[in-house]
Image: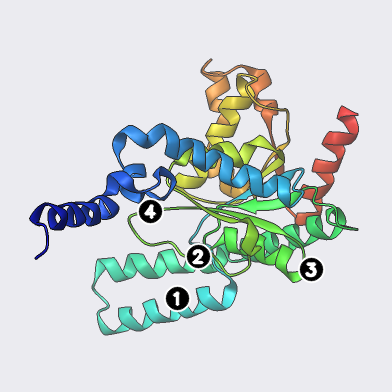
Amino acid sequence: MSDPQQIRAEQNLQAIMQSPSYRLAERDIELLAQPELRPVRMQLELLKPELAFKRLGVASTIVVFGSTQIVERTAAERQLEQAETALKAAPDDPYLVRLVARRQRVLANSKYYDEARDFARLVSTHCQLDGDSEYVVVTGGGPGIMEAANRGAFDVGAKSIGLNITLPAEQVPNPYITPELCFQFHYFALRKLHFLMRAKALVVFPGGFGTLDELFDALTLRQTNRMQQIPILMYGRAYWDQVIDLKFLADEGAIEDQHLELVDYAETPEEAWRKILEFYEQAG
């Protein structure tokens, strides 16, 4: 007959082995997800990409920001056609009237997709030679302008980086990022840090709230000398002059006149690349 105490001891041992407390801390997902472990999670989001960049020799980057909604021309034409078809069926629907107008603008702006792709192709062709990983294109890893920039590097067989972010609406990385350089973040702050830590330039294509957030984050850090001096190029002046009146801020005394010099403008991929090169030639 089995000893009842021994039976209980064996059962207790099984419970011990299955208890989360016995799990190695590094493998305890529930532990890492607790609010008290936020500092650890933030440190991991800092270190994981940093270690990968060092391992793959990524010495410097060029950051490309822009709208997720600006797609290549064929996709924009398809979206507009769908909206026009819907409007024909309900010509008095104000939502559909507005939708057609918005889709027309997306089609007009599809040129920026091509130009972002051309810019990334140009940079990657000149800077990733003989195994070097200088001026590696980095984006937010999503669709639209981000996809275009990663795609430009992909076109010429060069590395590019995608710093994706977990959002309420699922965001899948675009398919043109170098797999070993595609990261997913929870914290916007750590993602922004990695955008700018090794940046040699920031090229801002037309975009919305997210693009503006990232632009003004960089401008504030430059204004306060909290990051390295880099060229910040706003691509497509006609667009940006409608969105932001920086001169008005200076005229109102909200910023200094010298802060207007923190940004420059470009209209072509070649001009953007030339201005980046000139910036560093002048800096010595």
259 left or right of 209?
Answer: right
Which quadrant is the C terminus positioned in?
top right
The disc, 1 or 3, on the residue closer to the chain's N-terminal end is 1
Do tag 3 and tag 4 residues touch (Cβ < 8 Å)? Answer: no
Per the rendering, the mark at residue 106 is 2
What is the quadrant of residue 154 in the picture? bottom right
Q: What residue type is labelled 4?
A: Leu
The disc, 3 or 2, on the residue closer to the chain's N-terminal end is 2
Element under disc 2: helix
Q: What residue type is labelled 1?
A: Leu
Image location (x, y in percent) of residue 267: 72, 51
Per the rendering, the mark at residue 167 is 4
The disc, 3 or 4, on the residue closer to the chain's N-terminal end is 3
The residues bearing labels 3 and 2 have C-alpha atoms spaced at a distance of 27 Å
Do tag 1 and tag 2 residues touch (Cβ < 8 Å)? Answer: yes
Image location (x, y in percent) of residue 56: 74, 52
Do tag 4 and tag 2 residues touch (Cβ < 8 Å)? Answer: no
The disc, 4 or 2, on the residue closer to the chain's N-terminal end is 2
Residue ID for mark 3: 156
Please tell me whether mark 1 or mark 4 is closer to you in this view: 4
Element under disc 1: helix
Using the image as rendered, state which of residue 262 and residue 38 is in the foreground.
Answer: 38
190 left or right of 263?
Answer: left
The residues bearing labels 4 and 2 have C-alpha atoms spaced at a distance of 23 Å
